[in-house]
Amino acid sequence: MSIKRQKQLFKIILISGFFLIQSISFAIPSGGLSSISLIPKPVSVTSAPGNFSLTKKSSICISGKSHELTTIGEYLSGKLRTATGFEMVVNAAAKTKASGNIYLSISKFDKQLGDEGYQLSIKGGMINLSANNPAGLFNGIQTIRQLLPPKIESSSIQPGPWQIPAGTIRDFPEYSYRGAMLDVARHFFQVDDVKRYIDQISAYKMNVLHLHLSDDQGWRIEIKKWPKLTSIGGSSQVGGEKGGFYTQKQYSEIVKYASERNITIIPEIDMPGHTNASLASYPELNCNNKATELYSGTEVGFTSLCTSKDLTYQFISDVLSELAEITPGPYLHIGGDESHVTKLEDYIPFVNRVQEIVGKLGKKVIGWDEIALSTLRPNSFVQYWAKAENAVLGVKQGAKVIMSPAANSYLDMKYDSTTLLGLHWAGYVEVDQSYNWDPATLVKGVAKENILGVEAPLWTETVTNMNELEQMVFPRLLGIADLAWRSSSSGNWNEYKIRLGNQAERLKALNIAYYPSKLVPWVTQLKN
Ligand code: TNX
């Protein structure tokens, strides 16, 4: 080969090498760690030179051999294995750390991080994730997922590289209660659907799933002492199709699945209104001893338990005891909303008596904002959805409030007049509307210190399956998750919509049927 030819070849190799390096570096964002869009936005992100690469030799190393750490390590391994095809074994950490590995450790000394915060340090080619509690590690893992390319969420093996730029993230939530509610009474959702929903909400660091288990249209939880609740009350749903219910075993399976994902299940038995399914199952629960017909329409506020009968309280006590028995979380939700046919002079002593029943079971009451009309026990919580004056009344009685303003956080409201699913009694709730509010300033008389947290309910009068659920929930749920987690200094729609737009490929890889709102600059087909 002539010298000229050799020089030419050398040039070609140099140029193609340059392009190769260029294309590899494409895989990690040029702006470093702090340029990656994360939802919820972390408290602090600092970039540093270098990066971390996940390879087939990478493993997940846990400090010590606790059952909890192993479970969390396995969870992370499962999340990374599918798309990378790497084995991602979970080991006890060796004395000397190796590049390419992910280290998970619990250290009790970082006060600022609190119960659910974490520190993620990407340095020396390895990841060190530490937290005071397993919950913090779980949250840090959600951040790791979002730092990797979107295709990490794919359900089939994808080509790498799998890199994360170096730096440090310190992060902790503003509110300790960050929830979603699913109405499984109007339309029933199978256990697997509920699990998928748990996966979806926990990916955005939400930590509560409130299950609305009974309403006029259906009763969804097995109660051994009152079997007709499910055999009759569980048989219907909106639209007249066959309903369904969870056996106590299935409910426990949901609770366990949730707890492994840092989610507390809050069961709701709505009362004294929204009770047609129980009134149809047992004639003796009616003041006139006649069972009502099963109901498959969508009206609200036309039923009431018979508040003057002792049997009613025996019924409630039996139901709530069985539920308390299989609910490890601290709360039982007693509904209390829209009891339009219960006289106020009956409603108030009713709610007072039910609070006592719940207290005896060692649980705390949550109720919709109307329960503030009663005498709240210490440790009862008011869920604000409609009437600000009820929320304020709750605060005046010393109760904390869960913020679920219908006009912002209701996931069943239509986005706009063209949305096919959903309702619009609280107005249209576009993606900006569900993000542009601050829980701590929304209601005069309900300040930051009065707020337990934020919850986004999905009522399912019009929502019949997972695909429809996803169209209503996504992307609004991400905004609620962001504002429940964010530090008070953030929360600007123009900044947030860019981060949201950058989630498009990730939502697609997760196979989530999100609503592609025109207000969001969706970024699709990313190079990485
Ligand atoms: C009001 S929100 C209700 C529900 C309906 C919902 C529909 C609340 C406490 N009660 O029974 O499903 O509106 O958006």
Image (cartoon, rainbow, N blue to C red):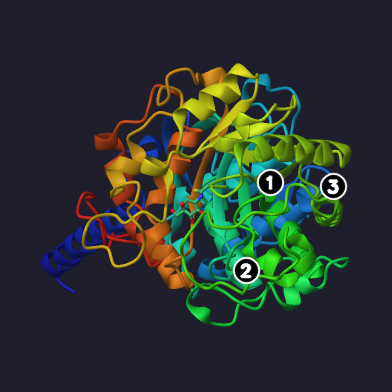
Q: Position of residue 470 (x, y in %)?
A: 43, 64
Tell me which amino acid carries mark 3.
Ser
In which quadrant will I find the C terminus? bottom left
Judged by depth in the image, the label closer to the viewer, 3 or 1, is 1
Q: Residue at x 82, y 36 (%)?
A: 356
Q: Nearer the viewer, residue 159 or 99?
A: 159
User: Dot 3 corresponds to which residue?
Assistant: 66
Q: Is residue 445 above or below residue 90?
A: above
User: Dot 1 corresponds to which residue?
Assistant: 334
Q: Residue at x 68, y 20 (%)?
A: 111
**Secondary structure of residue under mark 2:** strand
Label 3 to label 2: alpha-carbon separation = 42 Å
**Secondary structure of residue under mark 1:** strand
Q: Residue at x 31, y 56 (%)?
A: 414
User: Dot 2 corresponds to which residue?
Assistant: 218
Left or right: residue 277 versus residue 493 is right
Q: Position of residue 445 (x, y in %)?
A: 48, 17
Earlier sequence position, callout 1 versus callout 2: 2
Mark 3, Cα crowd under 10 Å, few <14 / some 14-19 / many 20+, is few
Earlier sequence position, callout 3 versus callout 1: 3
Label 3 to label 1: alpha-carbon separation = 37 Å
